[in-house]
Image: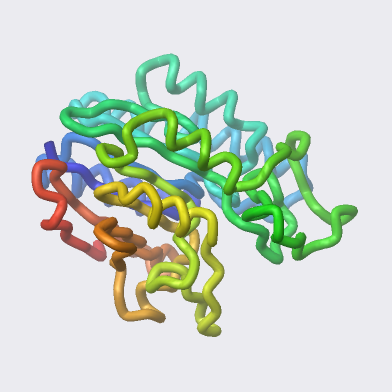
Amino acid sequence: MRYVFCADMHGVGVLFQKLEEFSLRNGIGAAIMGGDICPHAHLGLEEAVCYQKDFIEGFFKSFLEKLRKANIIALGMMGNDDFRVNMKSLERLESLGLVRLLHQKAHILENISIAGYSFVPQMPFLLKDWEKLDDEASKPLTSPERDILSIPREKGTIKWDLENLSGLSNPKKTIYVFHSPPFNTKLDMTYRGFHVGSRSIRSFIEKEQPPLALHGHIHESPEVSGSWRDKLGRALCINPGCKKEEGKLCVVVFDTMDLKKVSHYIL
């Protein structure tokens, strides 16, 4: 089975349309969406939450129904720009068999497991639903009184969560989908040249050596670093990038029978 991966579509309709059309044309068996599914909502908190909820229950549901009709398995999770309170809407879609949710879960497809993790390290943005301290030594980058959350803040660190994630499946036989890229790689560079990925995710990959790790979050990194792929030991790590402002979809395609052959497309 052929897999396609993308992230950071941010509710842009043409990108979902391109993902559907590309999957149909290229015999894709499973489409993996690595976070930031919903549109940006520059509104008050209540209105913004409702705006994303309507997107999930309307446009996104219809998109998933088209994939199911084409016998394409959909896997997905939220990212740091998605309001976590709307997970209930995604879970209803999962109960209808339209999507398999990845955050802190592992699913077996063919000969391999696929597991995911949505949290990113602290950022200078105010929405904190999917942000956590990277480890015990990390410090907040914003003032708590200004932080925006749609549900109570979850305790713990990314490092602590990843210890639990490794127990869901055999890491050596698992493809991991992390919204955040690993720190200090070709996948986490901003336009200003800063590395803003997760140190804990990097340590996890270096220790567990999964065959493939898929990332998003830092849209510009492949353009800045000149590469959409990097390696940590034997583990291949990928961030396809995001060009949503140009109406272009960035994806990678792979087959679990030969993960050395990963192709990158900008559609």
Indicate how the structure is coloured in the image: rainbow
Q: Residue at x 47, y 75 (%)?
A: 189
Q: Is residue 249 visible?
A: no
**Residue toward you, 126 or 228:** 228
Q: Residue at x 15, y 51 (%)?
A: 259
Q: Is residue 127 left or right of residue 116?
A: right
Residue that extends furthest to the front in the rendered view of this protein: 207
Residue that extends furthest to the right in the rendered view of this protein: 145
Quarter-wise, where is residue 138 in the image? Answer: bottom right
Q: Is residue 138 above or below residue 178?
A: below
Q: Position of residue 129 (x, y in %)?
A: 68, 44
Q: Residue at x 52, y 44 (%)?
A: 118
Residue that extends furthest to the bottom in the rendered view of this protein: 192
Q: What is the total number of numbered labels drawn onto the structure image?
A: 0
Quarter-wise, where is residue 161 in the image? Answer: top right
Q: Residue at x 50, y 19 (%)?
A: 92
Q: Is residue 95 visible?
A: yes
Q: Position of residue 35 (x, y in %)?
A: 47, 47
Q: Position of residue 147 (x, y in %)?
A: 80, 53
Can you say which quadrant of the picture contains the N terminus?
A: top left
**Residue toward you, 24 or 113:** 113
Q: Is residue 208 left or right of residue 195?
A: left
Q: Position of residue 48 (x, y in %)?
A: 69, 44
Can you say which quadrant of the picture contains the C terminus?
A: bottom left
**Residue toward you, 117 or 146:** 117
